[in-house]
Amino acid sequence: MTDHILEVRNLRKSFGALLASNNLSFSVRRGDVHALIGPNGAGKTTLVNQISGFIRPDSGSILFEKTDIVAMPAHRRAAMGLGRSFQITSIFDHLTVAENLTLAILAHSGHTFRFWRHCLRIPLVQQTLPSTLERVDLDHRANLPARHLSHGEKKQLEVGMALAGNPKLLILDEPMAGMGPGGTVEMSKLIRKLKTTMTILLVEHDMAAVFALADRITVLVYGTAIANGTPDEIRTDPEVRSAYLGEEG
Amino acid sequence: MLLVIEQVLNGLQLGITLFLMSAGLTLVFGIMRVINLAHGSFYMIGAYVGATVTSASGSFLLGILAALGAAGLAGILVECIVLRHLYDREHLTQVLATFGLILFFNELTRMIWGRQPLFMDVPPWLAGSIEILPGLTYPSYRIAVIAVGMLVALLLWFLLARTRLGMRIRAGASNREMIAALGVNIKILYTLVFGLGTLLAGLAGVMAGPILAVESGMGESILILTFVVIVIGGIGSIRGAVIGALLVGMVDTLGRAFLPALFRLFLPGAHADGAAASLAAISIYMLMAAILLWRPRGLFPA
Amino acid sequence: MASIARKTAVLLPIFVFLAALPLLAAYLDNPYLLSLFSRILIFAIAAVSLDLLLGYGGLVSLGHAAFVGVGAYTVGILFHHTTIGEPLLGIFAGSENALITLPLAVLAAAGFALVIGAMCLRTSGMHFIMITLAFAQMLYYTAIGLEQYGGDDGLPLYARNTFPGLDTNNDLSFYYLCLVSLLLILFLAHRMVHSRFGLIIRGASHNPDRIQTLGVNPYTHRLVCFVIAGAGAGLAGALLANQSTYISPGLFHWTLSGELMVMVLLGGLGTLFGPVLGAAAFLLLEEVLAMYTEHWMFYLGPVLVVVVIFARKGLYGLLIGSGKNHD
């Protein structure tokens, strides 16, 4: 039997008349880069928000590590090892790169009313910060206020913040959005590097990157998964070609 | 009983003054998202100019017209020179810049009119009292203030509810991105709204002239009451301003009038008066705190 | 980022100057300098505490004078009861020992900040500004109503609090007491700002929602920050009551809150040492302008408008160079 880290079963969510998730089911295997693609309005972001706990589904279940997490608040899911980056960059602009990562590292480690010790000298931070900086290739930028980073670097920082909690499953919501070709290459390199230590659920528009990176792909149309499979299977699936790839060219 | 009615009328009169102040300010807050501390300065300008023109010309009506013109014009100038630079800035910048304006205007009035307060006489044709109920006479001037205030409130309602300009102002108060997208000239709309607000503040100032002393810094005590009204009513809501102003006017006036008598039932005289005076002075803030605990965004959040 | 060397080059001479100021005052035979600079140091304490809210927490409080007033009135009331020989609330004889009155003043200010902050922090933005202002005014009117402590006129204290081993009525010793207090506050604030707590406060200032997704409740952190800032202002108030041997409702007044804000912004928002420079600049400017014209506010007002609209970094930023970092 395959080891699934995440199983989404019969998920339903409607906003008034709009069905954002329509009896949606799919599973993510441990260790995979699993890509989620679909035309605009297919319900990708709603799905990600349901998995990470920002939107409550109307019905259905989400199993993470065999536990149903549907009723769990977002910060408990994060504590279980479900990390995510955000589509719109939501880093702390006026804090330095190191401070941003420190906030994320400390977020789930006990109480936060520590007034005395310099935050960068807390043992946990000293242990984790250098490797986190290195993993997202920002070690040379550690003391720069985040607002001075390039767009691509901000995205890297955001991934770094999601990594800081040592997630088992990392959800990356359009990490390549708004990047030039150089940034896309950098981000692909980063994802390949991360793949060795965790499972990644990748939501992305850049088809070249998706087909190059993903082990498996789920295609979402109108809130339903119309296809699941390896990149090769997806490429040749007639339903996908007509519903989705055809439109994108 | 007659005393109660008299105090209720006093409360109504204070409430109406507060409404004139807060109607303009709540629109400025709601539409421009600017926290303007200097609104009280236009109240003061109205009072000073009104008092000066009235005593020079002998005509109170001329005084009112001059006060309206001066406050409105000063408002438009301030909007064009200073406020315009504050629209997309942080609240802290807005607070400090308008604090600077207060220092400027307070000192300006001291330079022009000196440090002594001016006293403004009630015009002779409003100097008497009217017997509104058997045994209850009430000063005609205060009745006139109440009447004018109500008339202005009606006009304002008509302007906002029935005219195209009013529709735009209301649209701006609830969604200012929308109003820009609709192609309305935001710059002129902002200037007009600001000028309208300061004009109303000037009216409140000149009408308060014969009741209070006209002095430098008079704008700030009313400004803080106005803030309480807006917080209670909800930022950007005219309806909230009406309800909030009446509530604050009533609670403040009735508290000052009746708390001492109430306290004297339980405490010895001197202590009772002191305690009652303190409690009366802070009663509106306690009202505000209570309403906030219940509704953090005010009674009528826009 | 400003280099350590640059900071030292700017700050060291200033501290040396402050430490040596009594020598200068003696040399110029100008004792007024000592009392002026004592006031500057005290206002600097209040401004630094306010900057924790304004600059680091992104909380625009327009009622900070309330806690200065509470601190001052605590000292004044305790002192008053020792002089009239009538115990406070019938139990506490009062005190004129600074080792008792100063901590009590700080505690009282913190207590008021806890209650007021708990209510104000339920709101944000413009509401927060207006509500902090309103609560400060409420305390102002309460102070006016305190007839037994002088009401509207305030209360003169005939001597400063005593401090073991120190003659506080000597302006020189008192000056150093203020200087040490300021250094202590700066050190504590420095630790706090760079601690984990400070990091959360700074993070929440621009992005409270994101802080929440990290599993942190911004409300409680902000409330604790509000209480700490209030306590700092309480200390300033207690020292101010001692410095001027006088308390009055004016200490609660919102113009003082406004002036403290001006000091913070003038000196450098979100910097620790900036508010000290701002307090010095503001009080010295007031002193100098008042020599030339009684209408100095007429000139200060427009200057203030221009400064806040166009000059963003403050004096500290000008001196240190790039004021980009929060340190």
Image (cartoon, coloured by chain):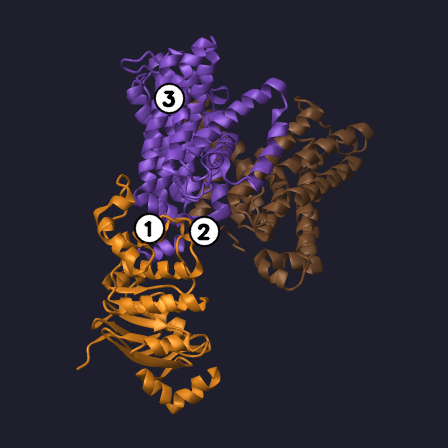
Q: Identify the residue at the far bottom of this view.
A: A238
Please tell me the numbered disc located at residue C178: 3
Please tell me the numbered disc located at residue A98: 1
Q: Report the amino acid beneath label 2.
A: Arg
* Residue that appears at 32% across and 54% down: A139
The subunit carrying tag 2 is: B
State how far apart marks 2 and 1 are (Cα). 39 Å
Q: Nearer the viewer, mark 3 or mark 2?
A: 3
Relative image position of residue A168 (x, y in whole percent): 24, 66
Q: Is the residue B276 above or below the residue C192 in the image?
A: above
Q: Report the amino acid beneath label 3.
A: Cys
Q: Which chain is brown?
A: B
Q: Report the amino acid beneath label 1.
A: Ala
Quickly name the residue at label 2.
B295
State how far apart marks 3 and 2 are (Cα). 43 Å
Q: Colour of chain A?
A: orange
Q: Quick one: label 3, few (<14), some, or many (20+) residues within 10 Å? A: many
Q: Quick one: label 1, few (<14), some, or many (20+) residues within 10 Å? A: many
Same chain check for tags 3 and 2? no
Q: Is residue B221 visible?
A: yes
Relative image position of residue C290 (x, y in whole percent): 59, 20
The subunit carrying tag 3 is: C
Please, what secondary structure does the residue beneath circle 3 have?
helix
